[in-house]
Each structure stands twice: as structure tokens, then as C-alpha cells.
Image (cartoon, grey):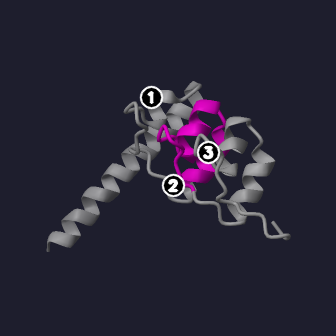
């Protein structure tokens, strides 16, 4: 990164370095990319973003990190799958279920305040 590497560069599938690191379970590399400002909302051509990829890879710690950074659990890929529907294991699914409940509640509360 110090030498000007582009954290948003894409390969032919549209995947960014962050998506590739998450798919390969390279949490060290993913952490460096996040600290360098990698876009957690960037998607590949199939609509897979960082949260979907981390959930599919079963990396609970990275799922938590992405949620802490504001990742939206309701985002779907081209096939209509959410991070919860592609979660690789129960611990990741539980984290996503709790986040989904919180995000839904927060959206309703924000909407109620906005309408006033």
C-alpha cells in the first residue's frame, strides 16, 4: 500500500483485492486492505460483496469486523442470496441473525424519527 497499490483494482470477474483475500481466508491481508480504505460495499460481477464472501468462507471474526464497519446484512447478490443464506457455519449465521435484527430495528427507529 505504501507504494501506491490500488486497493480497488479489479480482476476480470470484478473481484477486488479484499474479495479475493476474504475468499481465500487471508484475514491478515483483508485486515491490511480494510485499514487502507478498501470499499466493503464493492461487488464482483455476480454481486458478491465483502460480507457475503466472508460469510461464505466461514470467517466469523471478519464477518464481525465488516458488520462493525457498517456492512448491510440485507444486501443480496445476483442470485438473490444474502450473507445469512450463504453462511458457512452456525457461528457465522448466529452473528448475522443478531446483526439483521439490530439493523432492522435501527432502520425502523430511524424511519419513525424521520417521519416526525
Residue at the (41%, 45%) spot, across then down: 75
Viewer-proximal residue, 103 or 42? Answer: 42
Q: Secondary structure at mark 1?
A: helix
Asked whether, in this view, residue 112 is left or right of residue 43, the answer is left
Nearer the camera: disc 3 or disc 2: 3
Query: What is the spatial separation of the Cα atoms under label 3 and label 2, in whole angstroms?
Result: 12 Å
- The total of numbered circles placed on residues is 3
Quadrant where the C terminus sits is bottom left
Residue occupying image coordinates x 64% and y 45%: 19
Which mark is first along the chain, 1 or 3? 3
Mark 1 → mark 2, Cα distance in angstroms = 18 Å
Distance from the alpha carbon under mark 3 to that under mark 1: 20 Å
Q: Of the residues tagged 1 and 2, which is closer to the observer?
A: 2
Q: Position of residue 109 (x, y in %)?
A: 27, 61
Q: Quadrant of residue 107?
A: bottom left
Tell me: residue 7, above or below residue 92.
below
Residue at the disc numbered 1: 85
Give the left or right position of residue 100, taking residue 13 as reference.
Answer: left
Q: What residue is at 62 percent from the left and 42 percent from the top?
A: 12
Residue tagged 2 = 41
**From which residue to which does the magenta span run?**
40-67
Residue at position x 79%, y 50% in the image: 29
Q: Residues within 10 Å of mark 2 (few under 14, many from 20)?
A: some
Residue identified by numbered label 3: 15
Q: What's the mark number on residue 108?
A: none
Amino acid at each position: 500500500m505504501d507504494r501506491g497499490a490500488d486497493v480497488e483494482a479489479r480482476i476480470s470477474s470484478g473481484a477486488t483485492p479484499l474479495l479475493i483475500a476474504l475468499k481465500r481466508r487471508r484475514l491478515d491481508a483483508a485486515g491490511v486492505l480494510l485499514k487502507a480504505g478498501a470499499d466493503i460495499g464493492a461487488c464482483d460481477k455476480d454481486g458478491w460483496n465483502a460480507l457475503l464472501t466472508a460469510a461464505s468462507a466461514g470467517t466469523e471474526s471478519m464477518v464481525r469486523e465488516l458488520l462493525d464497519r457498517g456492512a448491510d446484512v440485507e444486501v443480496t447478490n445476483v442470485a438473490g442470496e444474502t450473507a445469512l443464506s450463504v453462511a458457512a457455519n452456525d457461528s457465522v449465521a448466529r452473528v448475522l441473525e443478531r446483526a439483521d435484527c439490530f439493523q432492522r430495528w435501527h432502520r425502523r427507529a430511524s424511519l419513525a424519527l424521520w417521519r416526525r
